[in-house]
Image (cartoon, rainbow, N blue to C red):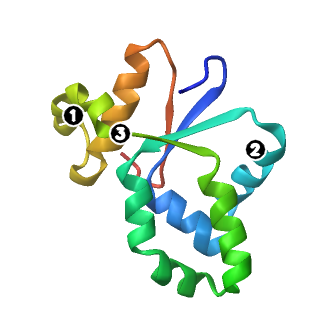
Amino acid sequence: MVLAGLNILIPDSNVLISALIKKGKVFELFEWNDFNCTLNFVAPEYLSSEILNNLSEIEKRSRLSKLEFGRIFDKIESQIEFVPMSRFKGFIPEAMKISPPNDFPYIALALFLKSQDRNPRILSNDKE
């Protein structure tokens, strides 16, 4: 359940994969939030399976030991609430009209959360 009052961020797959591989700014955001708990990361449920399906490639590209990679992956994944598409499927048609083709689930989730008087932000490297 998305908590009221917290800043809601919707990370897309590229941002999440980048955090796992490069340990850059997004990784630092997850590290910071692990102690401060002021951000509420929310993502479409399929993002979890997308990451898991590519986990060995992501792990290899990270150049970290299996143990260190597992620690980082667990820390990041534990902070994300994965929402089933069935909860926001009514917003998919509108999202498909206004978003790049691969990003509509993130936009649909944002529209769903906005309909509940939340103010989500999409965390993405895309300019759109």
Question: Where's the C terminus, which quadrant?
Answer: top left
Residue 106: image quadrant is: top left
* Amino acid type, residue under disc 3 in the picture: Pro
Helix, strand or loop at label 2? It is helix
* Amino acid type, residue under disc 1 in the picture: Ile
Image location of residue 35, percent across then percent down: 84, 44
Circle 3/circle 2 CB separation < 8 Å: no
Q: Is residue 40 above or below residue 80?
A: above
Identify the residue at image location x=55%, y=87%: 60
Query: Mark 3 or mark 1, which has the lower sequence index?
Result: 3
Identify the residue at image location x=30%, y=29%: 88
Residue depth check, mark 3 versus mark 1: number of the one nearer the observer:
3
Helix, strand or loop at label 1? It is helix
Query: Mark 3 or mark 2, which has the lower sequence index?
Result: 2
Read off the residue under disc 1.
Answer: 92
Identify the residue at image location x=43%, y=23%: 113
Image location of residue 14, percent across then percent down: 45, 61
Name the mark on residue 84. 3
* Amino acid type, residue under disc 2 in the picture: Asn
Helix, strand or loop at label 3? It is loop
Q: Is residue 54 above or below residue 63?
A: above
**Crowding near the residue tagged with mark 2, few <14, some 14–19, many ≥20 C-alpha atoms within 10 Å:** some
Q: CA distance from mark 2 to mark 1?
A: 29 Å
